[in-house]
Image (cartoon, helix red, strand yellow):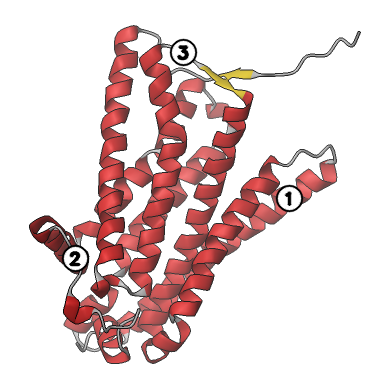
Amino acid sequence: MSNASSITHFLLLAFAESREMQLLHFWLFLGIYLAALLSNGLIITAIACDHRLHTPMYIFLLNLSLLDLGCISTTLPKSMANSLWDTRDISYAGCTAQVFWFLAFVSSEYYLLTIMAYDRYVAICKPLHYVSLMDSRACFKMTAAAWGCGFLNAILKLSCSDSYVRKAGFTVVSLCVACGCFLFIVLSYVQIFRAVLRIPSEQGRHKAFSTCPPHLAVVSLFASSAMFAYLKPPSVFSPALNLVVAVLYAVLPPAVNPLIYSMRNQDLKEALRRLFLSGKLYYPELSELSLFHPLPQECHRYIGIG
């Protein structure tokens, strides 16, 4: 008989040992989860139903909210259930599925944030070419590429291979892609800053740059939490710190991103206001509009002359 055994369950690290703290953890995370569901759901509903928001920037924002919902729904329900029922186990299949979906959603979100930086670059630095470069077909292809590359990255990350060369090669490629995306975002905003500074009027500069701070804030939150999670030195390793870091990059961004994007976005605020007041966002007079705004309105909004 073979002396081998298969792993069927894992034990998750608990947030607290006492029953009172476990229940506190459950109610705290339940509140965060419901807030994330509500805020992201409102953004998705507003953008999907309001024809005025059918522009590339808001289509990308809709997909960002979908990815945020996927990220927080992958890990938080299981953590809350374990705290509520005072258990720590997770099945092998459940752990694999959780790792796969989380990697897929996080990777897709990172690629989507890179695409959103390109969208801001084209809108501000090349406004006359915006409609031709960011038409509906290009928008769909870039969004599909972000989702597809994210899921491919998760598949490759979970693939079992005994070859050290393959594992090292995949790690190097993943690192190069991540650094390349980050460098692209930085260079895009360098060009955006240069273009904004060339605008003569202060009001024009403010209008041109007004759509960028939310994206910059989301990228900064995403990058800082990920870097702290994966690049922290081994000397500061501790189970408690790992739990805090896990909350930072798995729970905080999906819950905070909707607040960041809706706080200063007047168009989104108006769409949400109409949602609350009338219960619907469809306007018959807008049914003839195409998916994207005409060139003058779109360009004027970003170059500050509209």
Would you name the residue on which mark 1 appears? 170
Q: Is residue 261 visible?
A: no
Q: Mark 1 against mark 3, which lies toward the viewer?
A: 3
Would you name the residue on which mark 3 appears? 87
- Residue type marked 2: Leu
Report the quarter where the N terminus lies: top right
Specify whether 296 is left or right of 62. left
Above or below: residue 116 compared with residue 89: below
Q: Secondary structure at mark 2?
A: loop
Above or below: residue 27 compared with residue 97: above
Q: CA distance from mark 1 to mark 2?
A: 46 Å
Would you name the residue on which mark 2 appears? 281
Q: Locate residue 53, reporting x and y percent.
A: 27, 71
Q: Is residue 165 visible?
A: yes
Name which quarter of the figure residue 44 lies in. bottom left
| Closest to the observer, 170 or 277 | 277
Q: Locate residue 219, reporting x and y percent.
A: 41, 56
Could you tell me which residue is drawn at 51 percent across and 45 percent down?
A: 227
- Residue type marked 3: Thr
